Amino acid sequence: MISRYLDLSTAHVTQKDMDLISFDYDNNPVYSYDYEYGSFVFLPDTKSKIEQIELFCDLIEYGYSKSFVKVVKYAKDLDCTMIRLDCDGDTYVSKLLDTNNW
């Protein structure tokens, strides 16, 4: 299988998001693999808009920020199955994504 991934700076999410990504793998709405400079976030398969909305609600309920939800939505809109959040990743200037200074 060949799939797409979104490569972004960790500045597009909050510090709390990065902490949550690495926490509680059993109940977390997303799966991840951490490495020295960031994380790979694997997105669940959502076939319908309703499933996407349910995912976004689950993320907010779990404690993720609106910034993180925007990143996930952006990735989903681009048909990505994974997001790479890296401290040296690109920071995009976009109305669709937030930029956080932390």
Image (cartoon, grey):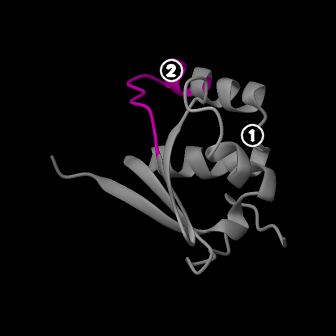
**Which residue occupies the foreground of this view, 55 or 88?**
88
* Cα gap from disc 2 to disc 1, whole angstroms: 17 Å
Name the spot of residue 40 as percent of width and height, x first.
Answer: 47, 56
Q: Are marks 2 and 1 in contact (CB under 8 Å)?
A: no
Look at 77% across and 44% down and name the residue there: 66
Q: Count residues near mark 2 (Cα–Cα under 10 Å), then give few for <14, some for 14-19, many for 20+.
A: few
Q: Residue, x 46% and y 39% (percent of image)?
A: 43
- Which residue is situated farthest in the left direction here? 1
Give the foreground label among 2 and 1: 1
User: In the picture shown, does residue 28 fall above or below 102?
Assistant: above
Q: Tag 2, which secondary structure? A: helix
Q: Is 45 in the magenta?
A: yes
- Label 1: which secondary element: loop
Residue under label 1, please give it.
64
Is residue 69 something one can see in this rendering?
Answer: no
Crowd class of label 1 (few under 14; some 14 to 19; many from 20; radius 10 Å)? many
Image quadrant where residue 45 sits:
top left
Residue 81 in percent (x, y) is at 38, 45
**Residue flagged by tag 2: what amino acid is it?**
Glu
Label disc, if present, on residue 54 of the rendered structure:
none
Q: Amino acid at mark 1?
A: Tyr
Q: Is residue 34 visible?
A: yes
Q: Which residue is mark 2?
A: 51
Q: Position of residue 88 (x, y in %)?
A: 58, 81
x and y percentages locating residue 101 in the rendered image: 84, 73
Range covered by the magenta-colored residues: 42-53
Residue nearer the viewer, 10 or 95? 10
| Residue drawn at the location 60% of the way across and 20% of the way down | 54
| Mark closer to the chain start, 2 or 1 | 2
